[in-house]
Amino acid sequence: MKLLELEGVSFNYGSQLPLVFQEITLTIGRGQCHCVSGPTGSGKSSLINLLAGAQNRPHEGDIWRHPQLVTGLVMQDPQTQLHRQTVGAEVVFSLENLGIPAESMLPKVQHALRRVGLFLRLDTPVSTLSLGQKYRLMIAAQLVCEPDLLLLDEPWAQLDDHGVSELLVVLRNLINEGMALVLVEHNATAFAEIIQYYWQLEDGHLSAGLHQTPEILPVIAPAWRTASKCEPFGKVLVQAEPFEFSFDSGHLLFTCPNGFKLYAGEIVTLIGDNGSGKTSLLKTLAGALSLKQRLPLKVLGRRPKLGVYGAELGLLMQRPSRQLFETTVLAEMQFSLKRFELPCERAAQLLEELDLNHLAELPPHQLSYGQQHLIALASLACMRPKVLLLDDPLAGMDKHYSSKVWYLLQKLTAQGCAILLTSHRKIPRDQISRQLHLHHGQLFEDVPEMQLRYVDQMSSTLVG
């Protein structure tokens, strides 16, 4: 049975702006699973909002919806959809608005949470959840209304591998029950077993496509990467003695029995599942998370405290929109340069270097999620910090934009910057020095054999 149909739909955000869609056609039937891929900034999120009926700007062409169609939408940034303070209140919110009898709510809420693998107390504060957990919470908040069509924007980027596996089980069951799904996803491979129809959105056109394994671009070290290393390469910039990490409530999040160090000129990844504590650790190192507990941490020779590092430390948050507030991209990149009296021409030079001049005069909040991530990172890179802390910097990016991120990171390490970046998954990049893991409540280091010599060399530098 047909649920929704687009026929010759064209759309843009203003009469003077180019078309986001040009006469696209799409039909969605019950029990079908569609996947829409495309370059960063091609309009995938706009399309999924249009399908959900959340996009109310005028459009050309026809959109037909089944009279009884119920649609659920989970946006790329789940924070924008959260309304309530606790897990139970968030999921029950829509039931309250629909006037469902109170005695029927509890079993529906519990069932929806179990379906997405969230076995939490209903009074758990939403603020304590990781971004990936919040994404699953928003899926539960949609499933509780039993939609006919569920729209998911970039679920792979927000979930760890275990979360993706759990979600696959949920989505497979939903399809078998007759629910239709539309996924917007760069990494279609992760959901290949349930996807029936592949679509490519590019240059405003939606065309049918075949599933292809995403190409991973090799990271090519720039010429200056092999040149003489700038001083003070190899210096310890972040040092942590063994510690236990607890919130003020007393809840033990993880332990670090051996401590860790971060050296100038290296990229270290922090790998862990949703909710393991990656973001909390980054915020603590930056001095942005104030705890009563006094941890044995030193960053740039000082105990972490907000505002003491100036331009020497940069923190990229998991939600890039929280760091973007200027009226244009160029003004955004110049803001910190002006604040710290650094050369403002660095901003324009870096936009040129990244081939992003076409974004310079656009408002940052009109950019796609992936573009916002890159601009927020580039704004930090302009300052040329000594320590850079990045929370899942590759989320929402295609291979083209990911290569720009890696170019920036390589350029910064060649200048002696120490970079710590988080991810749900191991990143197979030769340029990564070491990997830290947060697993089962323990933070430990896993040094690949090929990197042992690199670490030894840095240690020798310290001794010398």
Image: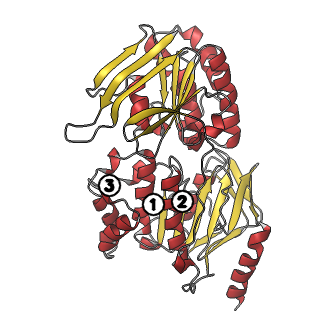
Q: Does the residue at mark 1 contact the one at mark 2 (Cβ under 8 Å)?
A: yes
What is the tally of numbered marks visible in this picture? 3
Q: Amino acid at mark 2?
A: Leu
- In three-dimensional space, the C-alpha distance between marks 1 and 2, rounded to whole angstroms, equals 8 Å
Q: Nearer the viewer, residue 318 or 226?
A: 226
Q: Quadrant of residue 103?
A: top right
- Sequence-wise first label, 2 or 3: 3
- Residue farthest along the right direction in this orientation: 449
Q: Which residue is mark 3?
A: 359
Q: Position of residue 112 (x, y in %)?
A: 62, 21
- In three-dimensional space, the C-alpha distance between marks 2 and 3, rounded to whole angstroms, equals 22 Å
Q: Nearer the viewer, residue 27 or 180?
A: 27
Q: Secondary structure at mark 3?
A: helix
- In three-dimensional space, the C-alpha distance between marks 3 and 1, rounded to whole angstroms, equals 14 Å
Q: Secondary structure at mark 1?
A: helix
- Sequence-wise first label, 3 or 1: 3
**Vertical placement of residue 193 versus 450, above or below:** above
Q: Residues within 10 Å of mark 2 (few under 14, many from 20)?
A: many
Q: Amino acid at mark 1?
A: Leu
Tag shown at residue 249? none
Q: Amino acid at mark 3?
A: Leu
- Sequence-wise first label, 1 or 2: 1
Q: Which residue is mark 2?
A: 390
**Vertical placement of residue 30 versus 13, above or below:** above
Q: Secondary structure at mark 2?
A: strand
Q: Position of residue 198 (x, y in %)?
A: 55, 31
Q: Does the residue at mark 2 contact the one at mark 3 (Cβ under 8 Å)?
A: no
Quarter the C terminus occupies: bottom right
Tag shown at residue 377? 1
Res 81 seen here: yes
**Vertical placement of residue 204 versus 387, above or below:** above
